Amino acid sequence: MDSELPAYLTTKEVADLLRVKERKVYDMVATGEIPHRKITGKLLFPHNELMCWIEGTGVTLPSERPALVTGSHDPLLDWSLRESGAGLATLWNGSCDGLEVFAEGRAVLTGLHIPGDADWNIPALEARGLRDAVLIGWAARARGLILTPAVADMVQGFGDLRGRRVILRQEGAGTTALFDRMMAEAGLSQGDILTPTSPAHTESDAAAAVAAGEAEATLGIESMARQFRLVFRPLVQERFDLLIDRRAYFTEPVQRLVAFMRSETMIAKAEALGGYDLDGLGTVRWISA
């Protein structure tokens, strides 16, 4: 029977194989218990890894993680990776997708700013059941509305976005989760704002779209408003943290970045960018069980 199954199974096929309801499969995905992939928003389950998991060998992860940094884009982190000479590649795909890539063993480090009820990032990590991972503090960032000067006097708070052109971030970004929460709190729906067809995938792309006139506003960070000479309305102080594989932490590329984090050069750059509070930089915020 196994030989007749495709290389990747659907949620229904996995539920049939395990003789459980599909809801149970989704629960196992949410906790990181079962090997899976998320491709264009659809869950797929690699057959070979699934059979190893069923037979008790656990989720098969690469013996060595690729030298890749993924997750949410942060301008200071992006600059530090280049300046430190760490030699780590980057894939800025948003906090949630970055966490997915990390959980599958396909990155050594991911940047996160996922809002929770009482804290940033930690609730999302505790729900995943990750192993051999540590969360290191990076910075607190000032996040708010980045506005064109033309509408700045008319947009004092989130509720004033009604009828405005707003550039959004991609699905799976921490900013998107925060934006949706603020929309609900302000009593707004997606139909109340005008949005370009394509979302922005980085903090700099979002601010650049406002500067270029493609939109009147975005939910961004103070450093990008400064860079593009736009108006900034602060709304929240968020935590941006680095989730690092504990074994990869001691490799040369990651250690280069960690050493650079403590340098006066990086501290001066954060000051120049603006909107960063480096209290807690490098502190351990969470360790997996």
Image (cartoon, grey):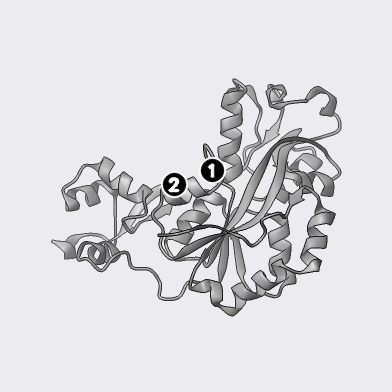
- Residue drawn at (25%, 67%) of the image: 52
Distance of label 2 from label 1 (alpha carbons): 9 Å
Q: Residues within 10 Å of mark 2 (few under 14, many from 20)?
A: few
**Residue at image mark 1:** 171
Q: Is residue 105 left or right of residue 185?
A: left
Q: Residue at x 65, y 26 (%)?
A: 193
> Is there CB contact under 8 Å for labels 2 and 1?
yes
Rendering quarter of residue 86: bottom right
Asked whether the viewer can see residue 190, the reply is: no
Residue located 70% across and 41% down the image: 143
In the rendered image, the vertical position of residue 239 relative to residue 253, given as above or below: above
Q: Residue 59's x, y, as percent?
A: 32, 64
Badge 2 marks a residue whose secondary structure is loop
Where in the figure is residue 119, as x and y percent of width and height? 55, 43
Q: Quadrant of the C terminus?
A: bottom left
Question: Would you name the residue on which mark 2 appears?
Answer: 41
**For residue 103, side relative to residue 219 (left or right):** left
The image shows residue 121, relative to residue 189, as above or below, that is below
